[in-house]
Image (cartoon, rainbow, N blue to C red):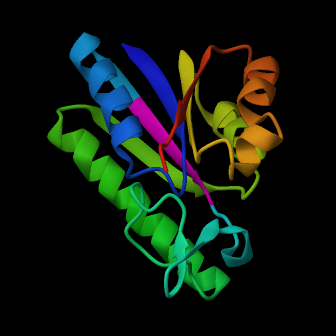
Amino acid sequence: MRSVLVVANQTIGGAELRRELQQRVAAGQCSFYVVVPNTAARHYHVVPAAGGFVPMPTMATSYGAPATDEEATEEARARLADVLAELAELGAQAEGHLGSANPVEAVEEALREREFDEVVVATLPRRVSRWLGSDVPNQIERRSGLPVTTVVSRG
């Protein structure tokens, strides 16, 4: 059985990641381990919109930017629970946890505990993604030696 490590936060509920995971389930037996980096409230991406600010991308998220780190943690926990429930509904084995706010460190933590066949990194669009700006997918691939698929949310 293939074991897939999924790393996502604000994009975890996005259609692009959902399709990617559904494809893996349809392709055959696999299990998922989802790591949600516990991002501080001040690092959430927001963009100007008519009448105020909205989270980015609006299509992938349905919540406002958290006011505190505690709210950010609770929102991350809720998104993790949602994706685990969705994977279970698809018939996939799935577990996960909140990890380090740094996605590369979060992956390294998971790799110390388990073995995986591949990593799926879901990120915000290039114009706002800190992860793409700091080359997170390639850093993960180099450090882990595993193939990495990058899923970019449309915003």
4 vs 43: above or below: above
Q: Where does the image place residue 10, in percent across and percent down from the top left?
A: 52, 58
Q: Out of 59 and 67, give the one closest to the viewer.
A: 59
**Which span is picked out in magenta?**
32-37
| Residue 4 counted in the magenta span | no
Q: Residue at x 81, y 19 (%)?
A: 142
Q: Where does the image place residue 21, in percent across and percent down from the top left?
A: 35, 30
Q: Residue at x 27, y 40 (%)?
A: 87
Q: Is residue 11 left or right of residue 29?
A: right
Residue reaching furthest front? 50
Q: Quadrant of residue 59?
A: bottom left
33 vs 86: above or below: above
Q: Is residue 111 left or right of residue 54?
A: right
| Residue 35 counted in the magenta span | yes
Q: Residue at x 49, y 51 (%)?
A: 155
Q: Where does the image place residue 42, in percent across and percent down from the top left?
A: 73, 76
Q: Quadrant of residue 100?
A: bottom right
Q: Quadrant of the N terminus?
A: top left
Q: Is residue 103 left or right of residue 116?
A: right
Q: How many marks are shown on the rendered structure? A: 0
Q: Out of 57 and 37, give the one closest to the viewer.
A: 57
The secondary structure that dominates the magenta segment is strand
Q: Where does the image place residue 116, in percent across and percent down from the top left?
A: 55, 21
Q: Is residue 116 visible?
A: no
Q: Is residue 19 visible?
A: yes
